Amino acid sequence: MIALGNDHTGYAMKKAVMEYLDSKGIPYKDFGCGDVTASNYPDYAKAVGRAIQNKECEKGILICGTGIGISIAANKMKGIRAALCHDCFSAEATRLHNDANVLAMGARVIGVGHALKIVEAFLDTEFSNDERHLKRIQMLEEN
Ligand code: RB5
């Protein structure tokens, strides 16, 4: 199950992501927002992060204008590894190396066609499970 969250700037891109997931038969849960009325990105980052923390969802996709605010908010949550990706290489690499469980994107930065290719790369790539990457991911939780 994929958790989806966005602020008002990411609403149109989130709808395109939903259509993509529908076309692939990938289940998702939408945590809002549900229109283009001004909203606050931390609310949606927290809702998606909580859904991953409580194992309701395995991964999340977050969208705001830049992808920056919403990824900062998500990364403050324990166990959440949100990767802001605007290219397919990064989306694949962050799954392989960081086992990122959230993809963040900026709807004001890239077009929808590009975003969907990034979503595909992110969701189609499994974590490498390499010892060195596991160790570094564990270190992320040590504060
Ligand atoms: C909203 O205007 C904008 O600040 C937000 O979508 C995001 O880009 C913040 O990082």
Image: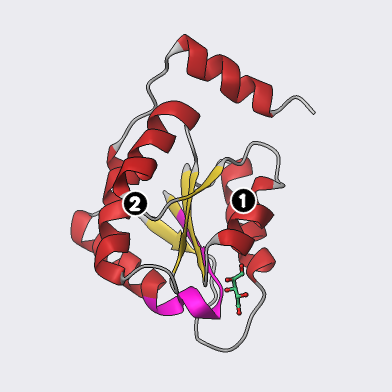
The residue under the point 57% across, 45% down is 52
Residue tagged 1 = 49
Q: Position of residue 98 (x, y in %)?
A: 49, 31
Q: Is residue 92 above or below residue 6?
A: above
Kind of residue indicated by mark 1:
Gly
Q: Nearer the viewer, residue 85 or 76?
A: 85
Instruction: Give the image location of residue 143, x and y in percent.
Output: 80, 28
Amino acid type at mark 2: Asp
Task: Classify residue 6 as left or right of residue 91.
Answer: right
Callout 1: helix, strand or loop?
helix
Of the numbered discs in the image, which one, if any, rests on residue 139? none
Q: Is residue 112 above or below residue 104?
A: below
- Extreme residue toward the top, this view: 131
Looking at the rendered structure, the number of numbered marks drawn on it comes to 2
Question: Residue 36: x percent and y percent?
Answer: 51, 87
Point out the residue furthest to the bottom here: 37
Q: Residue at x 53, y 72 (%)?
A: 32
Q: Secondary structure at mark 2?
A: loop
Q: Is residue 12 left or right of residue 98?
A: left
Residue under circle 2? 87
CA separation, marks 2 and 1?
23 Å
Start-end of magenta stretch: 3-12
Indicate which label's residue lies in the foreground, 2 or 1: 2
Give the side of residue 32 with respect to residue 120, left or right. right
* Residue nearest the observer in this picture, 143 or 51: 143
